Amino acid sequence: MSVDWLLTGGEIVSFDPATPASSALAVTAGRVVALGSDDELAPLAGPGTRRTRLGGAAVLPGFCDTHMHLEKVSHELSMLALGDARDIADVCERVRERAADAAPGAWIRCLGDAGGWHESNLAEGRLPTRAELDAAAGDHPVFLYRRPDHGALNTAAATALAGLLADAGDGEWQPDTGHLYGPRVRLVNDALYRPGVHEREQQLDLLARASRRLLEMGVTTVVDPGLPAGFDAAWQLYRAAADRDVLAQRVLLMNRFDWRGEFDAELNRVLHSTALPGDGDDRLRAWALKLVLDGEFTGAWLRPAEEPGSDRNARYSPGELRTVLRLCAERGWPACVHAMGGGAIAAVTAAVRELRAEGAAFTPGQVSIAHAFLITERDLDACAELGIGISVQPALAYTYVREMRAVWGPLAEQAVPFGTMARHGARFAGGSDTHPCDPLTGAAIAVTRKAWDGSSLGEHEALTPHQALSLYTREAGHHIGLRDVGVLAPGAVADFVVWPENPLGCAPEGWPSLRPALVAVGGRPVWMDHD
């Protein structure tokens, strides 16, 4: 019996230590069936076999992002990217171009969580004013958000948001300039999460566009940590997108507790959700229950020695944390805990240890920690002992380096110790959680240890190129418990990317500019570069 697809004449980078170097790859029924030399695999081809001559191109497993808010990203990828803008005229010209192509009354927004988008990088050292944005956008409402607490509105936007601005003080809202400051900026940003997107067709269109953009980055699997109490809506949207075949990626969706709600009510909501962990299929599957145990940088739960009283940032009591972990142990469900600081990491390891002492059984990786900033060797030992998985997001430190240093001071230099983790033998997977969400960029950050402003994140904590790419391939599959994802080996799912240039043969600084020639999911081509 002949194979469905035979690719020859390339460089197959399997990320599977047991698979030797090869030049050819055979696929049948959506899975890899063989790797070897061109001559070895030639007899597998038949009259109906699809043949691809790679011409020296490299084939790598498809990338898996273990922490991407997919629906949120689908909106953000449609926004203006201003990270490389260097003066007000440039910003306004981009607003003007977007206004010319936008539907009447459509909001114009920028991606606020982007490295480099900061008024200090503009020649004028300030954000555009209300009058400047009016001249560029006309009747289109404009909101330019600059993380974490600055923004600029034009007249149409200020009018539309009059209710939110009515009680703003002088230090929050300046009507003359159109500038916003402080927590009010986040309120506006949250209020505009879905500006003008009320119909399912519009949501699906944004998701379809985002899916194509992610394929151009080589992303074939996404683990979505969810939005607070947003599981059912996201599940229905992704189900519709997968059924229409406009969402090419495999998606694993977490059910995230809303820490602002009453715990028992949230637990009841989770238990009566549309799908429970493990439900779904190869295209869309419910995955872990998600708890956000502490905040971000200013709200991180640090160790007492680092910041006395930092446990005030704990969003769940020890009993509530144990309740969720015990439920997951009893039902065999994965659990993912957001732990930004060392105090939060220690709380997770303590809870798992206590539950195991009481007889709870957890499989390796069933409980995982997301972010793991400020993790120590002692924490790594505890995670290894208890079988706790770890996922990291290099782009977080890259993008939020100034916020991190402003809050943590010298401690920030110990925030993302990837090299120490690797030398310690820890297994950890990669994701984004913010922009840039390109895995090649995330891997490059892990190697170069450079932030968006050019500052160092600690060169001594650098990973090798192979280690960095493994975060989004083999280690990602291991993290989510799918050993047939993220590797190219007999029996693995045939999710792969053809790269004209092998990333491992290029300088990591150039990885973000690489573009694939072909992307396949489940042995089916889903994207091809026609340029």
Image (tube, grey):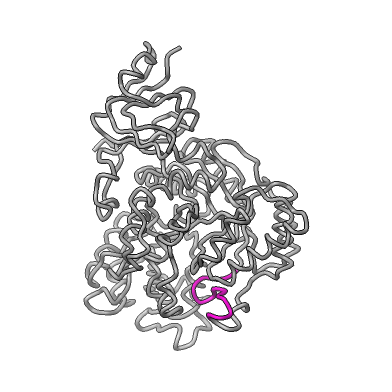
Residue 281: x %, y % from top left = 59, 36
Of the pair 338 and 84, the residue shown nearer to us: 338
Q: Quadrant of residue 353?
A: bottom right
Residue furthest toward the right?
Answer: 358
Residue at left offset 25%, top offset 38%? 500
Going by the image, does 283 lie left or right of 531? right
Residue at left offset 40%, top offset 73%? 413
Magenta highlight on residue 435: no
Of the pair 370 and 186, the residue shown nearer to us: 370
Residue at left offset 25%, top offset 41%? 501
Residue 173: x %, y % from top left = 44, 82
Residue 107: x %, y % from top left = 41, 62
Of the pair 391 and 466, the residue shown nearer to us: 466
Going by the image, does 224 lie left or right of 270? left
Does the image show residue 524?
Answer: yes
Residue 159: x %, y % from top left = 45, 73
Q: Quadrant of residue 89?
A: bottom left
- Say if 98 sits above or below 3 in the image: below
Does the image show residue 105?
Answer: no
**Quadrant including the C terminus:** top left
Q: Main secondary structure of the magenta part?
A: loop
Magenta range is: 294-306
